[in-house]
Image (cartoon, helix red, strand yellow):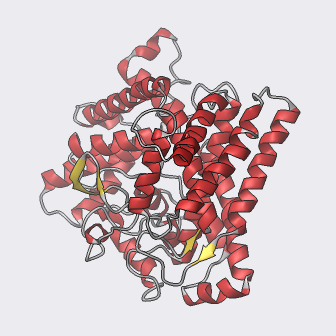
Amino acid sequence: MVSPTGAGLIVHNRLTHSLQVAQVARAIAERITTDPVSATTVCGLGGCDADVVEAAALAHDLGHPPFGHLGEQVLDRIARSRLGLPDGFEGNAQSFRIVTTIDLHGPGGAGLGLTAAVRAAVLKYPWARFGHPDPHPSTLLPAPRGAGPLPDAPDAGSAKFSCYSTELDDLRACREVFAPAITPWAQTIEAAVMDTADDIAYAIHDLEDFHRVGVLQQAGVAAELLGWQRRVAADEAGEAGPGADLERMRRRLAAKDGWAYDDRAFAAAVDRVRAELVDGLLAVAFDGSMAAERTVAEFSARWTARLVGQVRVLPEPPVRAAHVTLGLEQWHEVAVLKFVHRRFVLQRADLASHQRGQATVLAGLVDALADWLDERDAPRLPPRLHDLVELARAEYTATHTAPAEVNRLARGRAVIDYVASLTDGQASVLLEVLTGRSGRTGRLWTDAAVL
């Protein structure tokens, strides 16, 4: 998700997104467990409890750091290159770390004490960055979705993963319950439901948000979709002009996901998105009126019902698929909706400049906190940061014998844990406090409350 900071209207954030994913996930769970055909398959693969699915959906984004996916990429790069953490940072792995290790519930122990089913359902990518399981899914051809390397760091392990080395015992324990019905790199049924619900919510609600704030403009989207349709009709090639970006996306989709891709289904998806998004939702500018809100709500409800209503359960899915997936037509429609979001929102120059500033905030914050840990003033650390250092030190002591290495790893992981737990606003304010820029306002306690 894109950070909502600075938006003039109410948009989705991680909380509202998680609530919506939970609602969609419960609807999918109820559908596949009441359908006589899919229910038998679901039962044989470990079952699907609606409460478990909803809990996993509520927890799935806990590990996302400040500034959305941009923050995730920046923290991973900093964690690996500056702090020397082989696992780096990954939002899904951070979510698993939070629920199993960092957050506390009850008088003792670590983590929230969740059942094995809920912990397994949080594992969107049920493997570590390196090593586990063996063989590692990154060695498979084709590799599971997300298991391949980072484009700019081929030796850094899987791009996506759901567990750091410090939580491997938790991953093994919760996944053992589902063996051998679920292969070592496949999601459980409940995790697949959560993941599918996340896809649905992401594809629909981000488009709503950027329509509301006037970022998603009809003319540009219409030109690209119509341009692609004209190319197909005229059998034209070319790497530039309207429709070229969509055609490149189509080729990537066909090459990577041949298990699902279909030419006719893709063309039909473009036609439907053009009709309902371009000629429907985007045809009238959002003005904040009740009529405009009703149009957005109807668009969301209609698409959600359509996508949920055609979810399938696959007894033996291809490697790049899950046991629970969208129907053929809906799979292509979500791909086109995501393309619209990526092409007309994420690739905007104004967003890029804003995100460069956000990346600078995160880099400065990590540097400032890491320096603080190395200074004589360390006894006056924020209590939570101190606690995170001690927690990580205990974890790394169990796997490393050199005290200096344990200390280095513990400090690095604690800084990342601390920064990742902040909101967008808290990250910006804390950097101002640590660099002295907050002195201009004369406010000490309110601005430093995050400490």
Residue 245 in view (yes/no)? yes
**Residue at the outermost top position:** 440
Q: Nearer the viewer, residue 37 or 7?
A: 37
**Residue at the outermost right position:** 291
Q: Quadrant of residue 279?
A: top right
Q: Quadrant of residue 157?
A: bottom left
Q: Is residue 158 above or below residue 415?
A: below
Label count reads: 0
- 11 to the left or right of 254: right
Q: Is residue 263 above or below residue 227?
A: below
Name the residue: 40% across, 39% down. 238
Name the residue: 66% across, 31% down. 218
Name the residue: 53% across, 84% down. 315
Residue 72, how many percent across, how many down?
40, 44
Q: Nearer the viewer, residue 324 or 70?
A: 324
Residue 348, how many percent across, how many down?
49, 28
Residue 384, how many percent across, how many down?
43, 44
Q: Is residue 20 above or below residue 193?
A: above
- 378 to the left or right of 305: left
Q: Nearer the viewer, residue 76 or 193?
A: 193
Residue 120, how many percent across, how many down?
49, 72
Residue 422 in view (yes/no)? no
